[in-house]
Amino acid sequence: MINKTKSFLVVLLLILFYTGCTNKAPYTNRSQMILISQEEELALGEQSYEKTLKESKVIKNTNDARRVREVGKAIAKVVNKDYKWEFNLVENKEKNAFCLPGGKVVVYTGILKVARNDDQLATVISHEIAHALARHGAERISTNLVAQGVQVVGNIVVGTQIPQYDKAFNIAFGLGSQYGVLLPYGRMQESEADEIGIHLMNEAGYNIHEALKFWQNMSDGKKEGYEFFSTHPNSSTRIENIRRVIKQIEDKKVENFSNLIKNKNLGNRLH
């Protein structure tokens, strides 16, 4: 009976995993495991957004609030997604911003101290929009659901075979899933949002090199800890990854220009 129960749960988890791996992240084309519907995701985002605005001081009719809206709309224009985009500036000293499912972007006033021009502000907003486009929130929920399912299987097996190690298993599983899966997954999503964001900035006509200056501003005078214990990569890692993406974009532009010249020359010779 124990083996049958264990086999059933393992098969169930595998089915959930493979049926969920049908989504692809934009630009990076990474396969994603998403187990909740977009309708559920959008409903959760709307609830969180309304709660945030009710509990916050929303800044309106100022130059900074206008900048946030205009930069946000410029980036949203190049996004092929039917979201009801909203961009709000909220009074908060933290250097932060976020985008909830459905395109609800909130920028904290604190981050304007390091986002010193519209191109650097575009770095922030495009990064947050990228999270929504890649459905990172739904992906995190799905990852947690799978982790909980695996823990249930483990508890059944340990509880029926070696119950004296039940507590030790849960402690070990909690630490293992946190530092071995969830935190690395979070860092990967942040790096992916950086990459997608640079592509969005580029398509919207912003200076993508300003993204490097923004992250230099973020790290200026700040002592960063070990990435292993964080959900976010260090600024130095982000700068290195962004440089790589910028090079790829610029190399592609050169390649496209070269192909255009070759085709033009070929056309002239044919005539």
Image: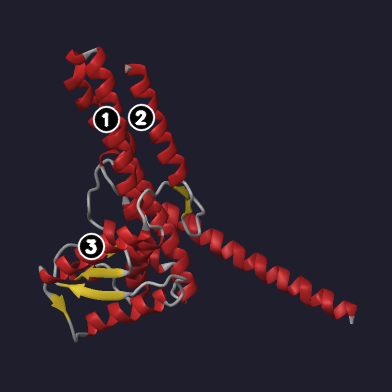
Q: Locate the C terminus by quadrant.
A: bottom right
Of the residues shown, which amino acid type is indicated by label 2?
Answer: Leu
Q: Is mark 3 on a helix, strand or loop?
A: loop
Residue 152's disc number: 1
Q: Which mark sits nearer the N-terminus, 3 or 2?
A: 2
Label 3: which residue? 96
Q: Which of 153 and 1 is in front in this view?
A: 1
Label 2: which residue? 9
Q: Nearer the viewer, mark 1 or mark 3?
A: 1
Q: Which of marks 3 and 2 is in front?
A: 2
Q: Locate the N terminus by quadrant.
A: top left
The residue that appears at 34% across and 61% down in the rendered structure is 39
Q: In this view, does 270 lie to the left or right of 216?
A: right
Give above or below for 11 relative to 253: above
Mark 1 and mark 3: Cα distance apart in space: 35 Å
Quick check: marks 1 and 2 in contact, CB under 8 Å? Answer: yes
The residue that appears at 36% across and 56% down in the rendered structure is 37
Give above or below for 250 relative to 148: below
Give above or below for 36 relative to 259: above
Location of residue 51 in the rendering, given as x and y in whole percent from the top left corner: 15, 66
Q: What element carries label 2?
A: helix
Mark 3 and mark 2: Cα distance apart in space: 40 Å
The residue that appears at 32% across and 72% down in the rendered structure is 121
Location of residue 55 in the rendering, given as x and y in whole percent from the top left corner: 10, 68
Q: Can residue 233 be seen in this view?
A: no
Q: Which of 139 and 244 is in front in this view?
A: 139
Of the residues shown, which amino acid type is indicated by label 3?
Answer: Asn
